[in-house]
Image: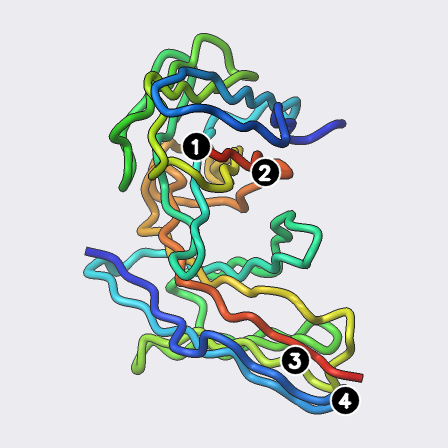
Amino acid sequence: NAGVTQTPKFQVLKTGQSMTLQCAQDMNHEYMSWYRQDPGMGLRLIHYSVGAGITDQGEVPNGYNVSRSTTEDFPLRLLSAAPSQTSVYFCASSYSPSGRAYGNTGELFFGEGSRLTVL
Amino acid sequence: AQKVTQAQTEISVVEKEDVTLDCVYETRDTTYYLFWYKQPPSGELVFLIRRNSFDEQNEISGRYSWNFQKSTSSFNFTITASQVVDSAVYFCALSEGGAQKLVFGQGTRLTINP
């Protein structure tokens, strides 16, 4: 198993450009999420999904779009990059030990991270 | 609203010392989950422990131990006989049992000096 795979690992963009961070998992996890990590602020949730076709906003969703057409993939789109989006992005997948969508949070498995710089 | 506070931004100790990383959380729910993750210099996030709000038993795993106290809303992490390889940023996180969403603390950068 590859676990959670993120691409690209590094990316430099100019302000206003668009791009997609790819995330794929092969553990058949229902839940996937995107976090950004900024110095001194820990990780903050951008968007998450509890299953194919279902997405919702996290703490810092502005400027980002997501979709979940399959269980395996959860891409994060930056429509018009801004310098404030310079960050390290982590994709994560997880499961519910109880099998229920809510009420029981399992371990999050993280990808290796994608470092994005917006000039 | 849920919140996690790791008041110690950086800690530096000499190898073989014991060190405790503090974590204080806020939540209105009675059912919640607490986590610790390690982020070594290589940057990946490594899961250490998950604890639910109904289980206040302390946990020990090798040199690592965790003290969960609901009365003080704390979930502290102790490394005994620290080693250089323990140098990393450690994150405490909280989930209110909904949809696998975690709220992270700011992280504590631990440096173990030889």
For label 4, the crowd category at 10 Å Cα-Cα, with few meaning under 14, some 14 to 19 and many 20 or more, is some
Point out the tag, 3 or 4, that comes first from the N-terminus: 4
- Please name the residue shown 74% across and 28% down the image: A2
Q: Which residue is mark 1?
A: A119
Are dots 1 and 2 on a single chain? yes
State whether discs 4 and 2 lie on one chain. no
- Mark 3–mark 2 Cα distance, whole angstroms, equals 26 Å
Please report the residue visible at 31 percent of the width from the left and 82 percent of the height from the top. B72
Secondary structure category for the residue under label 4: loop
The answer to whether dots 3 and 1 both sit on one chain is no
Is disc 3 in contact with disc 4, using a CB cutoff of under 8 Å? no
Q: Position of residue A78 (x, y in %)?
A: 38, 21
Q: Label 4 belongs to which residue?
A: B16
Label pair 3/2, CB-CB below 8 angstroms: no
Residue at the disc numbered 2: A113
- Residue type indicated by callout 3: Ile
The answer to whether B28 appears left or right of B68 in the picture is left
How far apart marks 1 and 2 lie (CA) works out to: 19 Å
Q: CA distance from mark 3 to mark 4?
A: 9 Å
Residue at the image point whose x is 47% and y is 37% from the top: A96
The residues bearing labels 4 and 1 have C-alpha atoms spaced at a distance of 44 Å
Q: Chain of mark 4?
A: B
